[in-house]
Amino acid sequence: MKSLFFGGTLMLYMNRDLKLLKDCQKGKPKAQRMLYEKYKQEMINLCMRYADSRASAEDIFQDSFVKVFKNIQNVKEPGSLYFWIRKVVIHTAINHYHKEKNRLFHEDINELNEQLKEEDQDIISQLNAEEVLRMVNELPDGYRIVFNLYVVDGFKHHEIADMLGVTESTSKTQLRKARLLLQKKIQTSNQIKCAV
């Protein structure tokens, strides 16, 4: 009996999502508002990882949803909607970065041949989520964006290179520098905690 109830509940949610998607594709304002509210907080949090300020994150979020509503016809299955929106937000954040900074990352020639170590220690596990977010947000823009794309969102270096218009080695170098800087921040944070 429980499985029928669960299955019925699951079908109800799937039907709601399908109706919401279809209504958004028809341009119905009420459905667009519901979709916007459904994903607002999670997507603003995603934007915060890429932006250098709250205002910038909100701009990215707004730009993203303009693109979402403009291109929602491309979504065929309601089950893929969340992932599609997430992809739009990430690409919008990267485009925003390019537009705001109007520059490419700088390559450090001495480090181009260095490879990232697969066995890098997990520098994040020593801190709570709030501390990690604060430290990542304090990274220079290039480091922060590559770190988020690679570590948090799971993109490969060749994908990051394509998105940012840089070489794979630049992406690897930026990630390596981000990790080193985070390690220093963690060490400093731990020293302060031990002294207190």
Image (cartoon, rainbow, N blue to C red):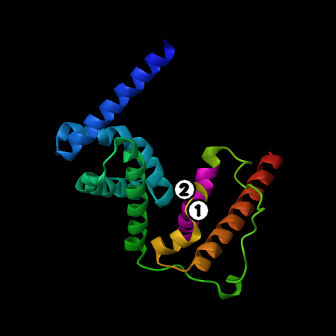
Q: With respect to residue 88, does 194 lie above or below?
A: above
Mark 2 lies on residue: 153
Drawn side of residue 192 relative to residue 137, left or right: right
Q: Are marks 1 and 2 in contact (CB under 8 Å)?
A: yes
Tell me the crowding category of disc 2: few under 14, some 14 to 19, or many 20 or more residues within 10 angstroms, Cα based: some
Drawn side of residue 147 relative to residue 16, left or right: right
Secondary element at tag 2: loop
Tell me the crowding category of disc 1: few under 14, some 14 to 19, or many 20 or more residues within 10 angstroms, Cα based: some
Kind of residue sitting beneath label 1: Tyr
Q: Is residue 40 visible?
A: yes
Query: Marks 1 and 2, Cα distance to the nearest angstrom?
Result: 6 Å
Percent x, y of residue 130: 60, 45
Q: Which residue is nearer to you in this view: 131 or 121? A: 121
> What secondary structure prevails in the magenta region?
helix
Mark 1 lies on residue: 150
Q: Which residue is nearer to you in this view: 16 or 41? A: 16
Q: Which residues are magenta?
A: 132-149
Percent x, y of residue 47: 44, 54
Kind of residue sitting beneath label 2: Asp
Secondary element at tag 1: helix
Q: Quadrant of residue 151?
A: bottom right
Q: With respect to residue 185, does 81 lie above or below?
A: above
| Residue at the extreme bottom | 109
- Residue at x-position 57% and y-position 66%: 156
Image quadrant in which the C terminus is located: top right
